[in-house]
Amino acid sequence: MEPWLGAAIGYIKDWLAFQVEVSGQPGCIVAIAHRGEIVLEAAYGHANLDSGEKLTPRHRFRIASHTKAFTAAGIMRLREQKRLKLDDPVGDHVADLHPDVATATLGQLLSHTAGLIRDGKDSGQFTDGRPYLGKDELLAELKLPPAIAPNSRFKYSNHGYGLLGLVIESITGEPYPSWLQREIMTPLSLRESAPDMALLGKSVPFARGHSRVVPVGRRVVIPGDNPTNAIMAAAGVVATAADTARFFAQLAPNAKKSLLSVASRREMIRRQWRVPQDAEEAHYGLALMSGTTAGFDWFGHGGGFQGYISRTSVIPAREITITVLTNAVDGWAPGWANGIKFILQAFATHGAPSRRTRDWTGRWWTLWGAVDLVPFGEQVMVANPVFLNPFIDAARIEVTGRDTGNIVQAAGYASHGEAVRRVRTKSGVSEIWLAGARVRPERVVRAEMERKYPKGRRRKDA
């Protein structure tokens, strides 16, 4: 592993621990793979707030729409076996569809451009209002016409992927979950994954989902153990963060080992449609979203299940895969995955710390909160761990002596050009003066705040 990546991983662990704490999220698991091998696995918070069960990297999550990439890999595998073509009308494989649905091609279903309804006439299956559709219910809804004309725009559809699951069953003559387990998961040694909750062993650790704090005034625990039935091919997979990262890492065209050919992987990743939205620019291929963040081109997918939010990004140029799983409906997985990209980019650009700067590190506190000293190369950044990009507007310190330095770059409202000084005791650095602001360890600031601002204290002039 390159030195810069090892240094980045060290800071990612600390930053994400802080993010989980200050955000009030129930829990989070992160896994990072480099060249297909897991180089970071970390868990924070709880698997179940009611029971107090701590989260571990071995806990399985509902990874929801990540499942679509598993299904697409299955379709591409069947294509490589010459058992189907992407321009096959779906009606060639599944009967009793509306005529306009039947003419949709497998490629259109994979790229969400068949114009199909998203979740049907009653999407209560995604709010615990009803069970997920069975096969007969799904087929009944697919006898209705498409919502819009095909190939007119990107329009997400879980029904479309449910239909792709039926295609796999029709071609293979097997139930979708058993085929997926044998043909996709087992060859990739995904031992901590299952096609659906109903196939997960009872003794396997499973993270429960959670609601927002509102409207109840607390987070309620959502079991998250309901089967996805005919929507399994769109949202059923249960997995650890590590298995999720392993699966997506092998989809990169430059992955050394993969279930699919390089041509198939390139076809999945190719930016076929722009995603209409006001957020960051994004595109979609065949079950893979893609974009550019922190200067990195990436592909991957996200997932939302009742009680869970997840995100995976693969950065082919760096052979890095990031998976972040959170167990709340307001989970911060997308933002944290992007934050990790910003951290990786900073270390990739500036390099690992030198011998001169490497001990200028740690989290330091004032009444206003925390700052992180993060050494790179010959300089030290003053990062803000509260931000999703901790290095935005970060000041830079040039180290001039063992315990002295100058702020050589800072935002206009910050302290550009001012001095930095570390204060030592026998046990090491006890405090730092950053341009006149004294920062100290958390325990010291916490004790001082509890002394100065005791609970129940009233102002004398109140």
Image: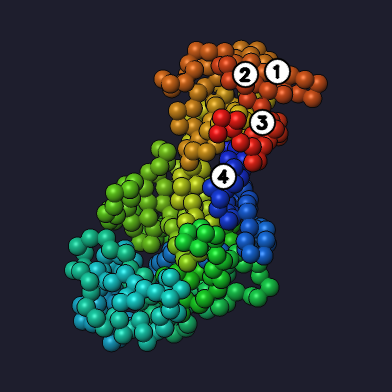
Residue 196 x, y percent position in the rendering = 52, 74
Residue at (41, 51) in percent of width and height = 299
Give the x, y percent position of residue 69: 43, 63
The answer to which of marks 3 and 2 sits earlier in the sequence is 2
Left or right of 246 on screen, residue 64: left
Residue neighbourhood size for the residue with mark 3, other residues' Cα within 10 Å, grouped as few (<14), some (14–19), many (≥20):
few
Q: What amino acid is at disc 2?
A: Trp
Q: For mark 2, does the 10 Å Cα neighbourhood hold few (<14), some (14 to 19), or many (20 or more) residues?
A: some
In the image, what residue type sits under mark 1? Val
Front disc: 3 or 1: 3
Position of 125 relative to 155 (above/below): below
Badge 3 amino acid:
Lys
Looking at the rendered structure, the kind of residue marked 4 is: Val
- Image-based side of 290 in relation to 211, left or right: left
Q: Work out whether residue 89 or residue 258 is closer to the camera in this orientation and state it.
A: 89
Q: Residue at x 68, y 23 (%)?
A: 431
Q: Nearer the viewer, mark 3 or mark 4?
A: 3
Residue 311, image x, y percentages: 47, 55
State which tag comes first along the sequence, 3 or 1: 1
- Residue 164 figure quarter: bottom left
Q: Residue furthest front?
A: 461
| Disc 2 target residue | 433
> Residues under labels 3 and 1: Cα distance?
23 Å
Q: What residue would you read off at disc 1?
A: 423
The residue beneath circle 4 is 22
Residue 335 visible in the picture: yes
